[in-house]
């Protein structure tokens, strides 16, 4: 079909159409003759497992990459985008899955990067940028000081900045790749209101998320990719979550995963009166005490800002100003023990932000997996036993079913789910007694989530003590042996597997009282 004939066959309510798009990489077909319609003034949902080709397709639509073959039609005319700026000039904006911010610049500078507001041709109008940025953040109901350095923001706040940056453009099509992966429920509600506002002004939204329930709530059309191929396209009103899962993976969701049978053993970790002072007064972690047994899966639930990640950072020795008593396997740990010593003693962390804190993108899978355990491969002083190291990596890749052609490829070439498995594998190669997992399923698809939780269950059955943080209620109820809830740095609820319900956890997360008060809720 000629471009002219193809354009004539595009429905009037389709603002952008990608036709027969293919993208080939050495040894990999990321997209294979994919058609994708973007309907004007609608939320166009795109789903698929990690590695299905979603992000590759979005990068092509946003001008980050060019297709190997295929055509794109914008407002009925064939277009080619050679860069993000090129696509932006034609009204297409994108919020990337992996945050694309400069940590050494402030919020306002990040929002207006490469298109700064000027007083004259040479001088940047910083005051105007601060004023505009403040208005955007207030629109998102998140009044952070625009002069704050991005490096000082937590991952959820950085996500808000990315959204503000996208909203600062005058766009007709806005691509949102996992925009809610690091947001609290309240922040998600704000974003949905913004989406409805944009729709009312005729803006088309392309929306990617692994939170399937939210897709059926805000989506108008849904397109499913599987292994780089178009699986189906339907109006959202005609389908449901089980249909989405069947089209994506053909199997049950993570909520139906049953942990492998395991029995909790002796106490492996005890934390007593752990305290982290907050700058300006008060406590981020407020005299918190907990215990963990070998082979136990302890879930921690709480809203953003509850102190969950800071708790993990204290357990890893990252805050010398913290105080309290920590006992590991019956032995006290010094409160100011450095990170590498904590790892050798038997505590490892899978961080919330795998790109910034869990991986070195330019290094290979093998080098990333052994970063935390190189000391185990030393021989004759400072020489690395390469054969032993490679054997360990190959074995862990096989055990965890990491999809990679070779351990020598750059970890950045892997899908999000497989990158997360690499981060988990890195921790496991250090032979921990306690594994801390901070939002381990953030930004990965339903199939990868299932695999991650199968790994968690297997590790618990082998006697590893696991504490994991998640904002997903269904996940924490599915996998935990016991759940504690945090609010304002304190434990406000503690529930056995039988006692834990969505209502109980949400109620406990909304209070700032002590545990006795919270238990009255249930």
Image (tube, rainbow, N blue to C red):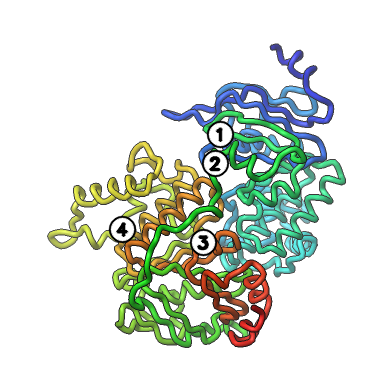
Q: Determine crowd level at label 1: few under 14, some 14-19, many 20+ residues with C-alpha closer than 10 A.
A: many
Pair 4/1: label in front? 1
Instruction: Calculate the distance from the C-alpha at mark 2 to the C-alpha at mark 3.
Output: 20 Å
Contact check, label 1 and label 2, Cβ < 8 Å: yes
Q: Residue 427: percent from the left, percent from the top?
A: 36, 60
Which is nearer the eye, 87 or 456? 456
Q: Is residue 330 left or right of residue 260?
A: left
Q: Splitting the image into 4 quarters, where does residue 12 fall?
A: top right
Which residue is located at x 43 percent, y 75 percent? Answer: 315
- The residue wearing badge 1 is 226
Which badge, 4 or 1, comes first in the chain's sequence? Answer: 1
Instruction: Calculate the distance from the C-alpha at mark 1 to the C-alpha at mark 2.
Output: 7 Å
Contact check, label 2 and label 3, Cβ < 8 Å: no
Label at residue 429: 4
Contact check, label 3 and label 4, Cβ < 8 Å: no
Element at label 3: loop
Outermost residue to the right: 200
Element at label 2: loop
Question: Vertical placement of 211 versus 278: above or below?
Answer: above
Pair 4/2: label in front? 2
Which is nearer the eye, 324 or 382? 324
Contact check, label 4 and label 1, Cβ < 8 Å: no
Element at label 4: loop
Which residue is located at x 80 percent, y 17 percent? Answer: 8
- The N terminus lies in quadrant: top right
Question: Vertical placement of 487 versus 159: above or below?
Answer: below
Instruction: Calculate the distance from the C-alpha at mark 4 to the C-alpha at mark 2.
Output: 27 Å
Which badge, 3 or 4, comes first in the chain's sequence? Answer: 3
Contact check, label 1 and label 3, Cβ < 8 Å: no
Label at residue 352: 3
Q: Splitting the image into 4 quarters, where does residue 377 fall?
A: bottom left
- The residue wearing badge 2 is 49
């Amino acid at each position: 079909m000629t471009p002219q004939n193809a354009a004539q066959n595009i429905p009037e309510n389709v603002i952008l159409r990608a036709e027969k798009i293919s993208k080939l990489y050495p040894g990999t077909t990321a997209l294979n003759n994919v058609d994708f319609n973007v309907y004007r003034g609608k939320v166009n949902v795109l789903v698929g497992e990690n590695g299905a080709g979603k992000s590759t397709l979005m990068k092509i639509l946003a001008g980050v990459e060019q297709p190997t073959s295929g055509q794109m039609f914008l407002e009925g005319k064939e277009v080619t985008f050679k860069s993000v700026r090129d696509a932006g000039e034609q009204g297409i904006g994108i919020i990337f899955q992996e945050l694309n911010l400069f940590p050494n610049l402030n919020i306002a500078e990040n929002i207006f990067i490469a298109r700064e507001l000027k007083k004259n041709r040479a001088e940047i109008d910083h005051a105007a940028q601060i004023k505009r940025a403040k208005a955007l953040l207030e629109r998102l109901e998140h009044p952070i000081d625009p002069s704050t350095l991005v490096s000082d923001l937590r991952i959820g706040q950085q996500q808000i900045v990315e959204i503000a940056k996208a909203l600062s453009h005058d766009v007709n099509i806005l691509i949102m790749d996992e925009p809610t992966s690091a947001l609290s429920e309240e922040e998600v509600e704000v974003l949905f209101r913004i989406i409805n506002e944009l729709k009312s002004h005729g803006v088309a939204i392309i929306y990617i998320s692994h939170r399937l329930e939210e897709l059926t709530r805000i989506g108008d059309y849904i397109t499913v990719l599987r292994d780089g191929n178009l699986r189906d396209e339907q109006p959202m009103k005609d389908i449901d979550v089980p249909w989405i899962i069947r089209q994506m993976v053909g199997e049950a969701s993570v909520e139906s995963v049953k942990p492998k049978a395991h029995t909790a053993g002796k106490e492996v970790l005890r934390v007593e009166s752990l305290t982290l002072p907050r700058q300006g007064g008060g406590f981020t972690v407020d005299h918190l005490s907990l215990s963990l047994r070998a082979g136990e899966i302890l879930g921690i639930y709480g809203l953003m800002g509850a102190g969950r990640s800071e708790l993990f950072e204290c357990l890893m020795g990252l805050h010398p100003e913290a105080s309290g008593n920590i006992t590991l396997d019956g032995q006290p740990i010094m409160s100011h023990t450095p990170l590498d010593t904590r790892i050798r003693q038997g505590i490892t962390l899978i961080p919330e932000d795998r790109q910034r804190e869990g991986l070195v993108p330019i290094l290979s899978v093998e080098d990333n997996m052994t970063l935390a355990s190189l000391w185990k491969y030393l021989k004759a002083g400072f020489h690395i036993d390469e054969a032993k190291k490679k054997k360990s990596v190959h074995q862990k890749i096989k055990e965890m079913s990491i999809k990679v052609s070779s351990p020598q490829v750059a970890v950045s070439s892997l899908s999000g789910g497989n990158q997360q498995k690499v981060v988990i594998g890195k921790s496991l190669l250090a032979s921990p007694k306690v594994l801390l997992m901070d939002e381990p399923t953030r930004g990965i698809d339903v199939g990868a989530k299932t695999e991650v939780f199968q790994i968690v269950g297997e590790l618990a059955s082998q006697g590893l003590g696991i504490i994991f943080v998640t904002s997903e209620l269904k996940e924490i109820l599915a996998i935990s042996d016991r759940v504690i809830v945090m609010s304002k740095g304190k434990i406000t609820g503690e529930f056995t597997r039988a006692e834990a319900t969505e209502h109980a956890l949400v109620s406990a997360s909304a209070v700032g009282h002590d545990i006795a008060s919270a238990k009255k809720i249930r």
